[in-house]
Amino acid sequence: MFEENSLTTRIAIGKGIGLLIGFSAFIFIPYFLPEASATLKWGVFLWYITFGAIIGVFGVYTNIPLIGSAMPWWIRGAYIGAWLNFTISLIAYDDLALLLISVFGENGLFVSPFWMVFEGAVIGFMIDYFATRFGGEGASIAK
């Protein structure tokens, strides 16, 4: 599909998957939370595009500097995705809580916005898989 591994390919794949996820969230948020603001919808849409780009960029790093060992793509993608969604859970806690309560009910199992951390790990894993598969990884891709 792609002729040569490159950082640009990784970023494009990450942004493309992020675009699909963000667009689907933009479309479906009003069904679950009709009173959702335009800021929330556009923020989630743009968040996942940026989310994918960041995971794509981090494909250059294959080692954990503090311990000097290899960092496989599945750890890297899941970790970065979880961390990014942890930060957004802190920033938009109230809006995410309303959204999750409207989806799962007040006594639902997944009403805490911190479930977004797990979701970020899953999406980060998926993005890094495709970015590594088709775009490569390591310092050699940063040409």
Image: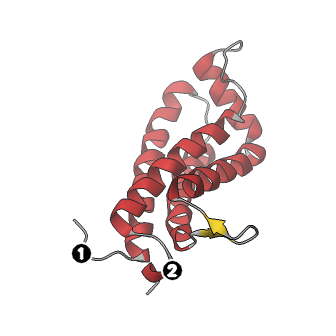
Picture layout, residue 106 above or below residue 80: above
> What is the secondary structure assignment of the residue under circle 2?
helix
Q: Nearer the viewer, residue 142 or 25?
A: 142
| Whole-number angstrom distance, CA of label 1 to CA of label 2 | 18 Å
Please name the residue shown 56% across and 64% down the image. Answer: 54
- Residue beneath label 1, please? 3
Counting from the top left corner in percent of width and height, residue 24 is at 43, 41
Which of label 1 and label 2 is nearer to you? 2
Amino acid type, mark 2: Ala
Counting from the top left corner in percent of width and height, residue 94 is at 76, 35
Q: Is residue 65 left or right of residue 32?
A: right
The quadrant of the rendering that contains the C terminus is bottom left
- Residue beneath label 2, please? 139
Q: Nearer the viewer, residue 121 or 87?
A: 121
Please name the residue shown 58% across and 39% down the image. Answer: 119
Counting from the top left corner in percent of width and height, residue 55 is at 54, 62
Quarter residue 68 falls in: bottom right
Amino acid type, mark 1: Glu
Classify 10 Å Cα crowding around label 2: few (below 14), some (14-19), many (20 and above).
few
Picture layout, residue 38 above or below residue 1: above
The quadrant of the rendering that contains the N terminus is bottom left
Residue 18 in sight in this render: no
Extreme residue in the bottom direction:
143
